[in-house]
Image (cartoon, rainbow, N blue to C red):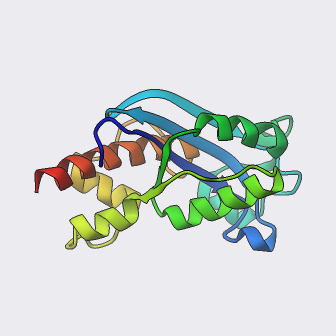
Amino acid sequence: MLPSSRFVVFDVETTGLTPSAGHRVIEIGAVCLENSVCTCEFHSLIDPGCKVPAAAQRVHGICDAMLCGQPGPSAVFPDFHRFIEGAVLVAHNARFDISFLRHEFSKQRLPLLNGIRCTLELSRRCLPDLPNYRLQTVARHLLGGLPLQGQLHRALDDARLAARVWVALGTAFTAK
């Protein structure tokens, strides 16, 4: 990890698991890190124009009523595109989050040219003896616990936690 680089650690919550099946992003949260310090955040709920399935609601707790009156994808994703300009993107299980981001960006005709890093893959390489590589497990190992405030499976809280993991992994990796 380059200490003077700009990274945006982000997370999405969705209506399902597969953008090609019509599932959509309903929440996005991001933390901008410069020199390993949070300089700003981005967060939005997004009205996808479709219902949130009960199975997805059980994961993140976001229901249709919470999305009513929220901005749609055409308002949120151009703003997020500007937010990430010039940054390397970081996510825990980046393959999932990036697949949704690419899908939503393509609908808005926005290019995704950012470099991408994955804390899940990095933690597998740096911490080979963990029982699993869920964000919470990696965070407990690296940080000695989870933050007392925040809600798991909400985009901004997960992005904040992933940012702390990213910084801790970078510190551990460069120390080796």
Q: Quadrant of residue 68?
A: top right
Q: Is residue 33 visible?
A: yes
* Residue farthest right in this picture: 49
Percent x, y for residue 69? 86, 34
The answer to whether 154 is drawn above or below residue 82 in the figure is below
Q: In the displayed image of the protein, which residue is found farthest to the left?
A: 176
Q: Residue at x 64, y 60 (%)?
A: 58
Count of picture labels: 0
Residue 146, horizontal then vertical, whole percent = 33, 45
Quadrant containing the C terminus in the rendered view: bottom left
Q: Which residue occupies 17% across, 51% down?
A: 174
| Residue 20, position as x, y percentages in the image | 76, 72
- Residue under the point 39% across and 64% down: 120
Q: From the viewer's perspective, tell me whether residue 149 is left or right of residue 71.
A: left
Q: Looking at the image, which is closer to me, 65 or 102?
A: 102
Depth check: 176 or 20 in front?
A: 176
Q: Residue at x 58, y 40 (%)?
A: 84
Where's residue 21, x and y in %?
Answer: 79, 74
Is 23 situated above or below 62? below
